[in-house]
Amino acid sequence: MKYPLSLKLLILSNIISGLAQGISMVAIPWYVASVLKSPSSLGYMYTFTLCGSAVWGVYAGTLIDKYPRKKIFIWFSLIGGSLLMMGSISGYILGTVPLFMVLVVFAATWYYNNIYFPALYAFAQEVCEAKDYGKVNSFLEIQSQATTIASGGLAAILLQGVELDSFHLFGTNIPFHLHIHPWSLSSIFLTDGLTYFIAVVLIMKIKYTPHTEKHHEAGTFIERLKTGANFLNKHPALWIFGVCSLSVFVVVLTHVILLSPLYIKSHLNQSAGTYALLDVYYAIGALMAGVWIRQLFRGMSTVKAIIILLFATVAILLLVTFTRSTLIFFIFSFIFGITNAGTRVLRITYLFHHVPNPLIGRVNSTLNVISVLCRILLSAIFSFAFFLRGDNIIWTYFFCAVFLLINAILMATKYKELVKDYSVAESAN
């Protein structure tokens, strides 16, 4: 298929800002856990951000459905870039980025993603034809994960630095001098902030004609929010699908932000390079899912495919619970990338076909609130002192496996209802 120029420009801006943003989101947890040596602060930071996200995520959905998505991209990119620059300046002035500014940048990036990615998918649904939804979602996942691979590799280099005087090729030692000093968090924030402003310039050039009918919905914030919830109430099985299909994403975020730095440091006794490379293995798996997931499950219902991916994730979580191997943890991250990205591509395509575009922002935000509440619960439990002692961090992965197992079983009980078609053309009211 031929992608609209408007979508190409948005994707290009996403690649530029996403590359630097990925480095920042790898650097922040490691900086708090290892440089500031405050793993408990990492848990509090994540929990605090999630609590705010529960409120912000709902409001973001109403903004996505009310205002032009192009304006949303511009304004929030400007805000995000400005806050990153403030974090960078504070680090240069004080010599190190204070914990408070790290929290501000982390929260700002998190909240930016809370509105950016739902708006991105809503925009894609708006400018593309229904027959292309699956291909577009797969392409967006491929682009996102390719960017993650690059940012993870760069993060590994920038956090540790590189001291290379030669490399081996077919048994021959070839002189090659490459010396890169480790970057400070201030420099990483500065680079990230600049890319936001570059993205704004690209987004301002976007011009498009919607394929879906766009209308302005009057009413207060509460009234518009209720419209999305009422749609889900008319389709209770869609509630189950929306929440359970997000469970892998819930565990992925908890793993990446909160658990993996402690697992690598306390259980595997590895360095920042291992942590950054973990992101690369995850992204390679996710990239493969974006390319092949639709072919892999061709002829199978979306719901059944997601249930299979849920059970596969349970299995790999149990594997890392009862092993102590860096190689297995890399393999786990690779498979985790496949199951999460595969679930996301299938889930979003299913929702595109079953939720009208004027409601997609609010429906997604309503479902995301449940996701956020689950993350808050998990992060609160995993912040207990018990999990921070010795290598007790392994039991967090066991809890995550149980959590996913419950969601897989719940979705399986609603299988027959979920495979029935809902009317895409149903009125928003």
Image (spheres, rainbow, N blue to C red):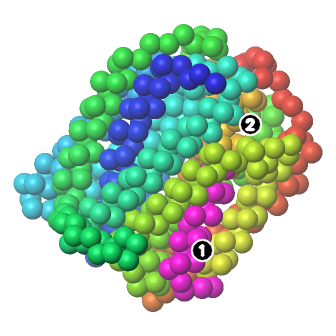
Count the labels in the image. Answer: 2
- Quadrant where the image shows the N terminus: top right
Q: Is residue 406 left or right of residue 63?
A: right
Q: Nearer the viewer, mark 2 or mark 1?
A: 2
Q: Which amino acid is tagged 2?
A: Tyr
Quadrant of residue 318 within the rendered picture = bottom right
Tell me the crowding category of disc 1: few under 14, some 14 to 19, or many 20 or more residues within 10 angstroms, Cα based: many
Q: Give the answer, above or below, for where 392 lies relative to 371.
A: below
Q: Position of residue 161 (x, y in %)?
A: 23, 67
Residue at point 70% right, 42% down? 347
Q: Residue furthest left?
A: 93
In the image: residue 316, left or right of residue 418: left
Q: Which residue is mark 1?
A: 397
- Please state if 345 lies on the left or on the right of 325 as rendered: right
Residue that carries the numbered disc 2 in the rendered image: 350
Q: What span is in magenta?
A: 322-342
